[in-house]
Image (cartoon, rainbow, N blue to C red):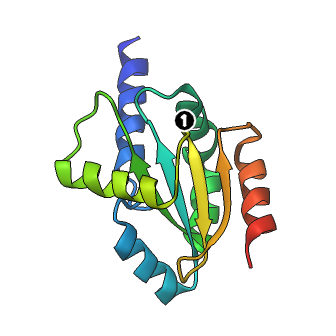
C-alpha cells in the first residue's frame, strides 16, 4: 500500500513538473508565433472541478496528448483553484484572461492560431479522451 501511494505521488509530481504547459499567456503567444504552432488555453478549476479533473486524467496526463501537443500546440494552463496556493500576480493574470475571453464555465478550452486569433472553444468535458481532443484540434485548425 505504501508503494502504491508513493507511486501515485511521484506520478503527480512528474505531471506538475512537465515543461509542456505554461502559465504565461504572452510568452506562449510569442513561442507559438516563432514555432508556427497553435495555442491551447485551458481554463480550469484544478482542485475543485470534477469535469476538469476528469479531463486532466483522461486527456492531459496521457503520453499521446504530450506527443501531439509537443508537435502542434503551446498549452497554457489558466487555473482557478480554491485550495492550492497561487500568486496574486497569477490570479490577476488568469482573471484578466477569463474576462477577455468571456469564460464562464470550467473547463473551457480555447484554441488560438499562432497570431492569437480564436479558432475554436469548448466548454465542459464531453469525454472521448485524447482521440476526441485531437479530432477537435484538427477539425478547427486553419
Q: Is residue 111 above or below residue 63?
A: below
Write the residue at 35% across / 51% down.
Answer: 95
Q: Residue furthest bottom?
A: 34
Residue 46 placed where, x, y %? 43, 36
Query: Which quadrant of the structure image shows residue 4?
Result: top left
Residue found 74% across the figure and 36% down from its top = 127
* Quarter occupied by the C terminus: bottom right
Secondary structure of residue under mark 1: helix
Q: Is residue 67 above or below residue 112?
A: above
- Dot 1 corresponds to which residue? 52
The image shows residue 57 at horizontal and vertical percentages of 57, 36
Camera-side residue of 107 and 132: 107
* 55 with respect to 19 (left or right): right
The residue lying toward the viewer, choosing from 84 and 64, is 84
From the top left corner, tell me how far across and down residue 59 is, in percent. Answer: 63, 45
From the top left corner, tell me how far across and down residue 68 is, in percent.
64, 64
Q: Quadrant of the N terminus?
A: top left
Answer few, some or many: residues within 10 Å of disc 1's Cα (few below 14, many 20 plus, some between 14 and 19). many
Residue at position x 35%, y 53% from top? 94
Q: Is residue 3 left or right of residue 63?
A: left
Amino acid at each position: 500500500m505504501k508503494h502504491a501511494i508513493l507511486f501515485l505521488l511521484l506520478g503527480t509530481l512528474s505531471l506538475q513538473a512537465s515543461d509542456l504547459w505554461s502559465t504565461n499567456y504572452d510568452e506562449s503567444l510569442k513561442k507559438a508565433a516563432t514555432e508556427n504552432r497553435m495555442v491551447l488555453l485551458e481554463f480550469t478549476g484544478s482542485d475543485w472541478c470534477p469535469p476538469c479533473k476528469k479531463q486532466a486524467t483522461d486527456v492531459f496526463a496521457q503520453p499521446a496528448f504530450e506527443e501531439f501537443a509537443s508537435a502542434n500546440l503551446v498549452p497554457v494552463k489558466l487555473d482557478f483553484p480554491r485550495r492550492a496556493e497561487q500568486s496574486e500576480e497569477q490570479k490577476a493574470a488568469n482573471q484578466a484572461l477569463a474576462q477577455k475571453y468571456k469564460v464562464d464555465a470550467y473547463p473551457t478550452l480555447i484554441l488560438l492560431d499562432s497570431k492569437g486569433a480564436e479558432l475554436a472553444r469548448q466548454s465542459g468535458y464531453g469525454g472521448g479522451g485524447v482521440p476526441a481532443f485531437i479530432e477537435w484540434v484538427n477539425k478547427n485548425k486553419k
